Amino acid sequence: MAASLRVLIVDDEPLARQRLAELLAEQPAVEIVGYATNGEGAIAEIEDLDPDLVFLDVQMPGKSGLDVVREIGPDAMPPTIFVTAFDQYALTAFDVAAVDYLVKPFDDERFEQAFRRARRVIELEQVGQLAAQLRTVLEQGGPGAPAPGPAPRPGGYLERVAVESRGQVRVVAVRAIDYITASGAYVLLHAGSERFVVRERLQTLEERLDPARFFRIHRSTIVQVDRIETLLRAGGGDYGVRLRGGIELKVSRSRFEALERRLGV
């Protein structure tokens, strides 16, 4: 009987860890040897458990998944499948020679594809080849090298966001987004008459948007600047904006002057 594939799951979201565990439970000869909820924990578990395969979330508090790869080093890093909500990081994952990546929310078929690829790499003993590719990237420090922390590289701001719509994964172009609102642990992307839900904090998403295109007008709202048609001043010190199409949004008093300067008023 073949030895079990020893897997470590790293994700700060309990539901995400549970989903991966359920999908892995359907695979033959797989043993989940541990879980980690942040980058520091991931590093410790990788060093202690020496897993065969790691499912590694990219966006985590503190050290990101890319920081984990850099700290472990190319020779010691097990084959890795990155899990990410944003395609910018998925592309970087390929740059640092990950086995594959999963864009949240992913379906069962996409998981199967990534997992089969990982098992094939491990069975064919191609791990050394991945390590060599990763070492080259880190030594060159080129555009594919993981940047410290989750902040996007210059010119590397989000251009697309993967979202689930009616049971399917849909890619929404950032340029199509009119404004973004916070809803607890989620954000709502408003694009014309459509609305998309993404499991991400507004602050985290703001850091990955081009500040030349987007402006945070309220603690719970980000707007694409070129959608603003009119600045609104109401009685009692209330401020707002009217977007093309007629949508009106509240602007925080503390942000209104900065918005005026941004618009050249």
Image (tube, helix red, strand yellow):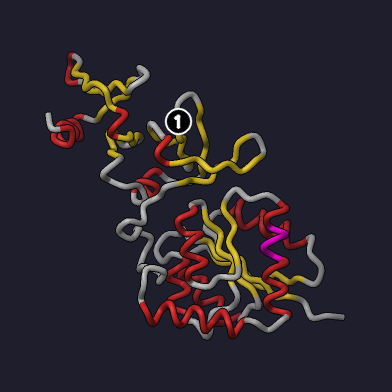
Characterize the local packing of mark 1: few (<14), some (14-19) or many (20 or more) Cα atoms within 10 angstroms: some
Using the rendered view, name the quadrant where residue 233 is placed.
top left
At which x and y percent is residue 122?
A: 69, 78
Please tell me whether mark 1 sits on a helix, a strand or a loop: strand
Report if residue 191 lies within the magenta region: no
Magenta residues? Answer: 111-115
Residue, disc 1: 191
Image-based side of 8 in relation to 264, left or right = right
Q: Residue furthest top?
A: 235
Using the rendered view, name the quadrant where residue 239 is placed.
top left
On screen, 36 above or below 210? below
Position of the C terminus by quadrant: top left
Question: What amino acid is labelled 1 in the image?
Answer: Ala
On screen, 6 above or below 241? below
Image-based side of 248 in relation to 232, left or right = right
At which x and y percent is residue 35?
A: 60, 67
